[in-house]
Amino acid sequence: MRAIGLILMLALLALAVFFSMANRDIVALGLWPLDIRVAVPLFAPILGAVVIGFVLGWFGGWMKAGQARRQLRQAMRDGRDAAVEIDRLKAALKAAQSSETQSTSREVAA
């Protein structure tokens, strides 16, 4: 699965390089509301917007999965608590059975 992801990432990187080579014209980028103009290659603002979109999408997905991670942690805590309770009950049952066996053997002996 990692190999497929790596291949896709390399393909996207190759497309970005080809896109950058094809769009090297200089454009004036105005930074509104400031009265500043910056001359940049055409590919820079486009690829910058794509990168920002990917990062925001990843962050949104990570935040959305936070609820599932929280529920998983709670379920794991509940599972550990249940396992401790099971062990405690097994020990109590074993103690009760051994004391019952001992009292039964005393009654038989008497």
Image (cartoon, helix red, strand yellow):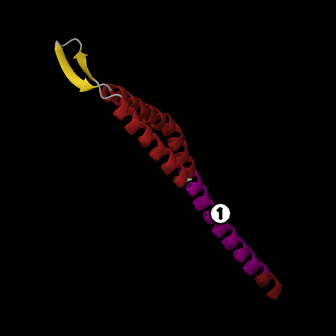
Q: In percent of the image, x 19 and y 21: which residue is there?
A: 38
- Any magenta on residue 53? no
Q: Is residue 56 left or right of residue 80?
A: left
Q: How crowded is the residue under tag 1: few (<14 C-alpha within 10 Å), some, or many (20+)?
A: few
In the image as oriented, which residue stretches furthest toward the right? Answer: 108
Which residue is more in the foreground, 35 or 60? 35
- Residue 6, percent from left and from top: 48, 50
Q: Amino acid at mark 1?
A: Leu
In the image as oriented, which residue stretches furthest toward the bottom? Answer: 109
Number of numbered discs overlaid on the protein picture: 1
Residue bounds of the magenta highlight: 77-104
Q: In percent of the image, x 67 and y 67: which residue is there?
A: 90
- Any magenta on residue 98? yes
Q: In percent of the image, x 55 and y 50: which residue is there?
A: 4
Which residue is more in the foreground, 82 or 29? 29
- Residue 71, percent from left and from top: 54, 42
- Residue 110 visible in image: no
**Quadrant of the image for the C terminus?**
bottom right
- Residue 52 visible in image: yes
Q: What residue did someone put label 1 on? A: 89
Which residue is more in the foreground, 103 or 68? 68
Q: Is residue 105 above or below residue 73?
A: below
- Residue 14, percent from left and from top: 43, 42
- Residue 47, percent from left and from top: 36, 30
**Element at label 1:** helix
The quarter holding residue 84 reads bottom right
Q: Is residue 6 left or right of residue 33?
A: right
Q: Is residue 4 left or right of residue 108?
A: left
The quarter holding residue 48 reads top left
Q: Provide the major secondary structure of the magenta segment.
A: helix
